Amino acid sequence: TYAIAHERTEERREEWNERYLRARNFLTYRMNRFHSGLITRAQRPRWSRRLFFLDLDGVFDCEALGFPHTTPSGVAALELLGSHDFSVVLNTGRSIEHARNYCQSYSLPGGLAEFGSVFVDAVRRCEMALIDAAAADQLARCREGIKRIPGVFIDSGYHYSIRAYRYDGAGTVGLSAAEVEDLLAQCHAIRLTAIRRQEDTYIVQRGTGKGPGILAVRRYLGCTAEPVVAIGDSEWDLEALAMAEASYAPGNCSRGVRELARRANCRIMGKPFQRGLLAAVQDMLGNGVASGGACPLEPTRRGGAGDLILALLRVAERPRYRQFLAALDYRGL
């Protein structure tokens, strides 16, 4: 990313940006393929009346290896939900392309992507846009407007919203508030608003989000009367967590989620990331599954790189104090 930020010609910057995105997606998709091989109850995706809405970043996925991927605990949580006839529905800010891949890799029935801008039904093999035609036209104008802002790039995987960012050192940064305001004004994008994060900025239709997305899915599936479960970790999950009949958050959740838990039906787990997800699923099911110890999942093929990757991911899931102690004794790794 440092080289992209300091590349002088615009054409070369765009080329390197696309190569970076393709490389990152390749690694993410390959790890999805690897982890899906750990699931022993492989089956075709199907819908049930029991819906579990799952956030990706910070919940099912982490970036211990430098790109999004899950861990053995995340896979164990998926398998546990599947064995109890839950339909796991992604509810993420990631692109539609990522949602398609995760559904295909893990045999999930569907998912919400791009902060509730689109719904993927992997069972019926269709997609439902949750934005209107006016917003789509304004998004197209904003894409052209962003191209005129120096040093700003667009993630081409987003089709129903816009993800924009600059490269800065080893990572990315989002647009400033003034830049976003000017962009929306110049493009006459009255139907759009922005989600500003430190690492990137999203342009989405007003009124969309993870919460409205849950309502849309429940109506689509005819499950408006059945209770649903949701898990998330950030400010952008608050509406979804508040409207679910039962909601959870891993221990790494934001301050806003912790404040919600004090006044609503949201439970924060003592463990972070994927271990927190697994603990939440175990708590929800109340089936007495042990919450500690090693995950029983193993590679489908013994030996080789699969064992090494699994060992590294298990090390990454250890509490920090155990990682520190292991670092003092290499035999403990």
Image (cartoon, rainbow, N blue to C red):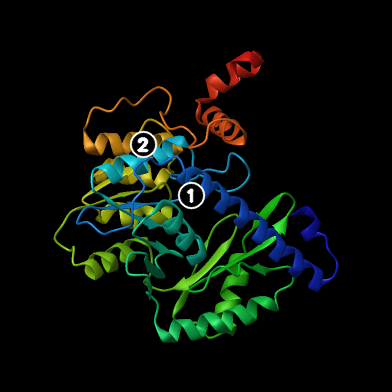
Asked whether residue 268 is in view, the answer is no
Query: In the rendered image of this protein, does residue 141 appear above or below residue 122?
Result: below
Q: Which structural element holds mark 2? A: helix
**In this orientation, which residue lies closer to the viewer: 324 or 30?**
30
Query: Residue 327, located in which quarter of the rendered image?
Result: top right
- Tell me the residue at 18%/63% (across/down): 223
Q: Position of residue 263 (x, y in %)?
A: 25, 44
Q: Quadrant of the N terminus?
A: bottom right
Q: Which residue is mark 1?
A: 57
Asked whether residue 203 is in view, the answer is yes
Is 302 situated left or right of 235 in this image? right
Q: Which structural element holds mark 1? A: loop
Task: Tell me the crowding category of disc 2: few under 14, some 14 to 19, or many 20 or more residues within 10 angstroms, Cα based.
Answer: many
Is 276 situated left or right of 187 in this image? left
Distance from Cα at disc 1 to Cα at disc 2:
15 Å
Q: Amino acid at mark 2?
A: Leu
Given this view, does label 1 or label 2 mark the residue nearer the observer? 2
Q: Which residue is mark 2?
A: 278
Q: Quadrant of the C terminus?
A: top right
Query: How many marks on residues?
Result: 2
Task: Tell me the crowding category of disc 1: few under 14, some 14 to 19, or many 20 or more residues within 10 angstroms, Cα based.
Answer: some
- Tell me the residue at 54%/20% (across/down): 321
Q: Position of residue 294 (x, y in %)?
A: 43, 24
- Tell me the residue at 31%/25% (across/down): 290
Query: In the rendered image of this protein, does residue 167 appear above or below residue 178?
Result: above
Is 25 situated left or right of 128 in this image? right
Q: Position of residue 68 (x, y in %)?
A: 55, 48
Q: Residue furthest right?
A: 8
Is 18 situated left or right of 225 in this image? right
Q: Amino acid at mark 1?
A: Asp
- Tell me the residue at 86%/67% (across/down): 8
